[in-house]
Image (spheres, rainbow, N blue to C red):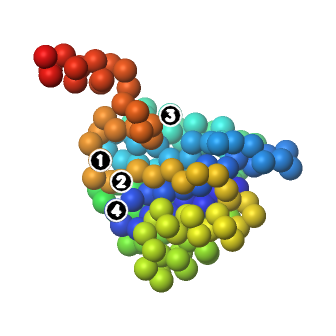
Amino acid sequence: MTTIAFDGKTLACDSQGNGAYTVQGPMKKIWKVRNLIFGWSGLYSDSILYRDWLIAGRPEKKPDIGYSGEGCALLIEGGKAWLQHAPHFVKVPVGPQAAVGCGCDFAMGAMLAGADARQAVKIAVKLDKGSGGKVQALSINEPKHVTNSAKPKRSARLRARRRAK
């Protein structure tokens, strides 16, 4: 269960994983792939299939989301928000604000009242029993090399040190 929100600048989500009637996590629910970012509401394994499909350049053969046949990506491409529901993955425009997952109503209400995406997810986490954990966020203005990690990859740190010498 998930809450993912987009405010026009930032895509944010909760990090709680749920499955087998237990709380699991933390889970990564948003990714940056080339010139787009997306969040996935649904099975974690399906999110990996969807991510790999995007990395492969969206070939005609779509990911086999077989077990549940459900899942939804909130995709941000070119600064615009789209929904792509499994298993067909037709891009449906939404926005300028959008939210998906079991806490989406709470997040949308918060954004309509003036909250940004991060704040909206924090509010949804307080109200929705299926959402929880720390908020993860990616900005559409971050450079391509930025990942979800607050700590740069080792190779990036080494290059920065070498340049500084």
Q: Decide which of tag 2 and tag 4 comes sooner along the chain.
A: 4
Q: Is residue 116 visible?
A: yes
Residue that badge 2 annotates:
139
Question: Residue 158 appears at what percent x and percent y?
Answer: 28, 18
Check the image and name the residue furthest to the right.
21
At 64% from the left and 63% from the top, the residue drawn is: 125
Q: Residue at x 18, y 16 (%)?
A: 162
* 84 sits to left or right of 142: right
Between 160 and 93, the one nearer to me in the picture: 160
Q: Which residue is mark 1?
A: 142
Residue at point 55%, 64% (across, down): 121
Residue located beneath label 4 in the image: 9
Q: Secondary structure at mark 1?
A: loop
| Three-letter amino acid code at the position of disc 4 | Lys
Q: Is residue 113 above or below residue 32?
A: below
Q: Give the x, y percent position of residue 36.
A: 36, 48
Judged by depth in the image, the label closer to the viewer, 3 or 1, is 1
Point out residue 157 in the picture as x, y percentages from the top left corner. 30, 23
| Of callouts 3 and 4, the N-terminal one | 4
Asked if disc 2 and disc 1 are in contact, CB closer than 8 Å, the reply is yes
The residue that mark 3 highlights is: 52
Left or right: where 70 falls relative to 141: right
In primary-sequence order, the first of circles 2 and 3 is 3
Mark 1 or mark 4: whose residue is earlier in sequence = 4
Residue 151 rendering spot, x and y as whole percentages: 40, 33
Q: Quadrant of residue 8?
A: bottom left
Q: Residues within 10 Å of mark 2 (few under 14, many from 20)?
A: some
Q: Check the image and report above or below for 157 versus 69.
A: above
- Quarter of the image for residue 140 reads bottom left
